[in-house]
Each structure stands twice: as C-alpha cells, then as structure tokens.
Amino acid sequence: MQDKSIVDRIEELKSKIEESVKDLKSSKSLYELKSKFLGRTGEISDLMKCMRDIPKEKRPEAGKIINALRDWAEERFGIIESVIKLSELKEQYKNEAIDVTLPGNTNPTGAYHPNTLIRRELISVFAGMGFTVYEGPEIENDYYNFTALNTPKDHPARDMQDTFYVTNDLLLRTQTSAGQIRVMEKQAPPIKILSPGKVFRSDDDATHSPMFSQMEGLVVDKGITLCDLKGMLDEFAAKIFGSGVKTRLRPSYFPFTEPSVEVDVSCFECGGKGCKLCKGTGWIEVLGAGMVNRHVLEGCGVDPDVYSGFAFGMGIERIAMLKYGINNMKLLFEGDVKFLRQFKMA
Ligand code: DAH
C-alpha cells in the first residue's frame, strides 16, 4: 500500500511545479526553479528524507514513486527548457538582425599617384639588379649640378636647362645627375646607385612642368662597358614595358658622359609596326645615358684608367605617361581625384 501522505505530497508538489512553470520567461528563472525542486536541498530531495518516517516494508514502494516524481519533474523541466531556449534564441536573432541590403559605410581611400607607382616599380626593378637608392638634396650647389658634371660656367650645355637660382651658387637642381657626384665623392667603387627625386626647370607648357621627377642611375666598377649598359636597359625595358620590348641606342650628347646615347624602346603599343604613340617610327625615346666622362670620374677622385662606369637618367612623368597612356602632363600635377582614382588598381 502506498503511504497516503506521501502520495498527497507528491500530488501537491506536481501541481506546485505545474503552477510555477506557467509564467516562466527566462532560462535563468527556470534554473532557479529547477534547483528549488530538484536541487540537493530541493523539495523532492526533502521528500526523500521523509523515508525515515515510513515503515520499512513500505519504503521501496515509496522510493519508487518519489523517483517517478523526480523523473517526471526532470522531463517536465526539460521540455520547458527547450521551449524557453528556442524563444530566447529567436529573441536574440531578432535583436541581432542586420539588414544586409542596407548600403554599408565605406571609408574613402586614396590612390597612389602614377608617379609614385612608377617610381616604386622602377626602384623594384633596379633593386632586383643590385642597385641601392641615394636621395640627394633638391637645393644644390652649382658645383654638383653643373661644374662637377663637366658643365663649367661658360659651357653651352647650360643653355639647355633653364635654372632656378636661389643665390649665385645655390640653385634648385635641374637634374638628379647631381647625385652621381655626391655618391662618387663619398663612396669608392664598386658603385651601383639609383637616385630618384624632384627636379626644377623654368619651363612650363603642355609637355613641360617647372617641377618634375627624374630617376638617375650610376654604375662604376672595373671593366664596365657600354654592353653592360645595353644589357641592363634590355632588362629594364622588358620589366617595365613588357617582355619582347627591345632597346636601341642612338648617339647623343651630354657633357658628363662620353659616348652619350639616347635610348629608345621598341613601341609596346604597336610592337614596332608604327602607330600614333611612336609617331609611326616603331620606337619611343625613354631616357638619356652614356659612359661616365673621365673628367667627371677624375673630379670625384676616381681613377678613370682603373675604373669606368655608365650613367642614365629618365623622367618619371614621361615613363608614367607612356605606360598609362596619359596624353597630358598637366594631369599629373593637378591632383584631380577623378583622374587619380583610376590608378588604384594599378
Ligand atoms: N641629366 C640628363 C637630363 O636631365 C639626363 C641624363 C642623360 C642623365 C644622360 C644621365 C645620362 O645620367 O647619362 O636631361
């Protein structure tokens, strides 16, 4: 026979549980309720403690019904828990919902200037051949910009460059070639440097700007010949303008090189057949170069009977214009973001 008072208490507990789970809203209050009934000091455990007062023969049966109550309560709480969790999850999803169709907040980003892109590309190509970078001053002595470059005061070559003078002796450098002298004065051969930077000339029209950028190169060592220059230029042309682009040297004149050459690359637009870009010639002039004049070497304390070298100089804007098909040099100086943004992906 079941103990009457235990059965009653069980029924009571059951309805108490049913009653209290009715308004359960959160898993936190569910856990509190669960431990109130099922915890070690909870009401169902209390019931177990009453077993002592039950006659021994009735205890197994009483134990069974209390355990059945525990199982029932656990199952009941389990069901409620899954319902509450689901609604809490739904609530969380609702609160965290984002509208993926809303336009995002974009931070406007800049783009590298074509000059910067070309300068970096050139440096990387020449660095791959072992060149290091030397940046000389933009305000130069007449000596470094002209005299040491075999262009003394009365030299007619000075007429080719309209110089901005600061004082009689100080000027805004007209060419990065000035860097050659500064490097040779400081460093004994072997020398292999690049000198990029701004240069200034009193010149302003559709194809000239009073400020533009050049990249100078200088190699001095024992046994350097024009063939070394040609080989290096071929590598440069292929890397910058595309494989298959060739170079050719035409005789020219610069006071600081002897012999001097003008360097053309085969037209990368038409492959040499002749087009608008190469003005029908199949070739495009890209830089000036030559073997360093022995007077220049001597002036820097380098023995021209032991050492020889080649030098080259190019306009960065010119390379950028050719490479990106820019037809007006002014675009490179106006800072129009609509123009500049196009180079973002370059
Ligand atoms: N400095 C020259 C110019 O501004 C360019 C140049 C020509 C540089 C020949 C060189 C060179 O190093 O060898 O027009």
Image: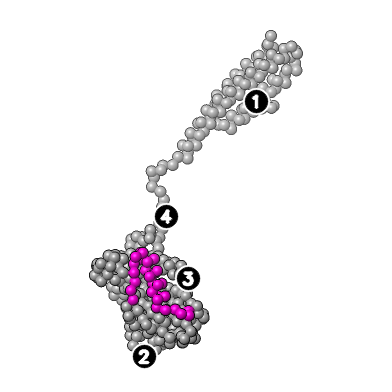
Tell me which residue sits at (29%, 75%) in the image.
Answer: 205
Residue 81: name its quadrant: top right
Q: Is residue 40 left or right of residue 186?
A: right
Mark 3 Cα shell of 10 Å, populated few (<14), some (14-19), many (≥20): few
> Between tags 2 and 4, which lies in front?
2
- The tag on residue 154 is 2
Q: Is residue 19 above or below residue 338?
A: above
Circle 3 is placed at which residue position? 130
Q: How far apart in space, not on screen, are marks 2 and 4 (Cα)?
A: 56 Å
Residue 241 falls within the magenta-colored stretch: yes
Could you tell me which secondary element the residue under label 4 belongs to?
loop
Mark 2 Cα shell of 10 Å, populated few (<14), some (14-19), many (≥20): few
> Between tags 3 and 2, which lies in front?
3
Q: Is residue 206 left or right of residue 45?
A: left
Tell me which residue sits at (45%, 40%) in the image.
Answer: 97
Amino acid type assigned to the residue bearing label 3 in the image: Gly
Q: What is the x, y in percent for residue 213? A: 38, 73
Circle 4 is placed at which residue position? 107
Amino acid type assigned to the residue bearing label 2 in the image: Asp
Q: Compare marks 1 and 4 and give the one earlier in the sequence.
A: 1
Amino acid type assigned to the residue bearing label 4 in the image: Asn
10 or 135, which is in the foreground? 135
- The tag on residue 38 is 1
Residue found farthest to the bottom: 154
Q: What is the x, y in percent for residue 166? A: 41, 83
Could you tell me which secondary element the residue under label 3 belongs to?
loop
Mark 1 Cα shell of 10 Å, populated few (<14), some (14-19), many (≥20): many
| Callout 2 touching callout 1 (CB < 8 Å) | no
Image: magenta residue range: 221-249
Amino acid type assigned to the residue bearing label 1 in the image: Leu
